[in-house]
Image: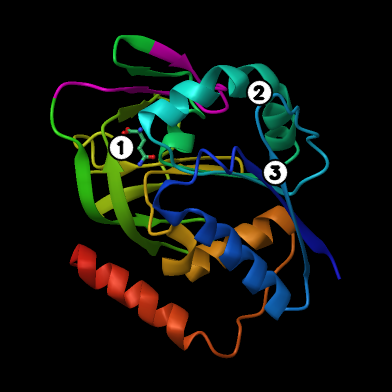
């Protein structure tokens, strides 16, 4: 049986909104199916081995956490992430982590570097934070599905003209509160503003990420009643 090898980037700093729940869900979904699960971490100064992991995870963070990690991430993780994404590894980045996947995050008069894995930039413009329950429609193969979660970001993200969003906003603000799109999806690189944590509320997405990371097809699990209820409640909260 294959094993899903996950690497969390800066798990001590980039974990706002209990993003570790995303890792717990990936582990459970693998183990319940008899798949192996390995979880490693890469912190400040650690270079990434692009072949050692199937899925790289970057959680959300406050501006000050991003200030602390952005230069190191650009310096020590950029090459490994590009190589990994190039061979089809999954990169899942949420909120603060998503912002640093692009070219830069401009905040408080400073321009934080991103790793340039996707063509986007983020700017902290004047105006309120974009906060609230959010639902989007996304297609990661197999037709459109709803991803529901909670967003809370000051930064507004703008995708380059050739870049595809993760989904279309059904309710909420999305990337910038203006263009009706949310997140980014390029190769198997996925960035999103949706916390929740994201995967406990959207179990279909967790399963799809495992499939993409391992290049396999999963059978549904027999009893996903609780997970289904979490998804339904997140959808209800967003009003869709
Ligand atoms: N600090 C970023 C912002 O406010 C990201 C916040 C987050 O990860 N929730 O835009």
As drawn, the label of residue 78 is 2
Query: Could you tell which of marks 3 and 1 lies nearer the N-terminus?
Result: 3
Is 221 above or below relative to 116?
A: below
Residue 105 visible in rendering: yes
Front-most of residues 89 and 4: 4
Secondary structure found at label 2? helix
- Callout 3: 10 Å neighbours few (<14), some, many (20+)? some
**Residue where numbered disc 3 is placed:** 41
Percent across and percent down for residue 27 are 66, 66
- When the figure is inspected, residue 154 is found, relative to residue 55, above or below; the finding is above
Q: Is residue 172 visible?
A: no
Q: Can residue 100 be found in the magenta stretch?
A: no
Point out the image quarter for the N terminus: bottom right
Residue tagged by mark 1?
175
Q: Is mark 1 within 8 Å of ligand 1?
A: no
Instruction: Give the secondary structure at mark 1.
Output: loop
Viewport quadrant of the C terminus: bottom left
C-alpha span from label 2 to label 3 = 16 Å
Examine the image and state in which quarter residue 39 appears.
bottom right
Look at the image and give the residue range highlighted in magenta. Answer: 111-126
Q: Label 1: how many residues lie within 10 Å, few (<14), some (14-19) or many (20+)?
A: many
CB contact under 8 Å: marks 2 and 3? no
Q: Position of residue 47 (x, y in %)?
A: 75, 27
From the image, state whether disc 2 or disc 3 is nearer to you.
3
Q: Nearer the viewer, residue 16 or 133?
A: 16
> Count of labels shown?
3
Closer to the camera, 156 or 47? 47
For marks 1 and 2, give the CA distance: 23 Å
User: Residue 159's image quarter?
Assistant: top left
């Amino acid at each position: 049986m294959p094993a899903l090898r996950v690497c969390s980037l800066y798990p001590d700093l980039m974990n706002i909104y209990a993003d570790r729940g995303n890792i717990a869900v990936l582990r459970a979904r693998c183990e319940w199916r008899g798949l192996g699960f390995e979880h490693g971490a890469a912190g400040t100064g650690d270079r990434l081995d692009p072949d050692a992991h199937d899925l790289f995870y970057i959680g959300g963070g406050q501006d000050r956490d991003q200030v602390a990690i952005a230069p190191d991430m650009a310096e020590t993780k950029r090459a490994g992430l590009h190589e990994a994404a190039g061979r089809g590894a999954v990169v899942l980045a949420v909120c603060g982590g998503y912002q640093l996947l692009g070219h830069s995050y401009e905040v408080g008069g400073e321009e934080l570097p991103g790793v340039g894995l996707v063509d986007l930039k983020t700017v902290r413009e004047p105006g309120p934070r974009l906060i609230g329950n959010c639902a989007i429609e996304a297609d990661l193969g197999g037709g459109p599905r709803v991803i529901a979660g909670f967003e809370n970001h000051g930064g507004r993200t703008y995708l380059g003209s050739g870049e595809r969003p993760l989904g279309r906003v059904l309710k909420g603000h999305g990337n910038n509160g203006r263009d009706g799109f949310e997140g980014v999806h390029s190769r198997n690189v996925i960035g999103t503003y949706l916390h929740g944590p994201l995967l406990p509320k959207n179990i279909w997405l967790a399963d799809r990420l495992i499939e993409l990371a391992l290049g396999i097809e999963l059978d549904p699990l027999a009893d996903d009643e609780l997970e289904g209820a979490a998804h339904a409640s997140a959808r209800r909260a967003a009003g869709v």
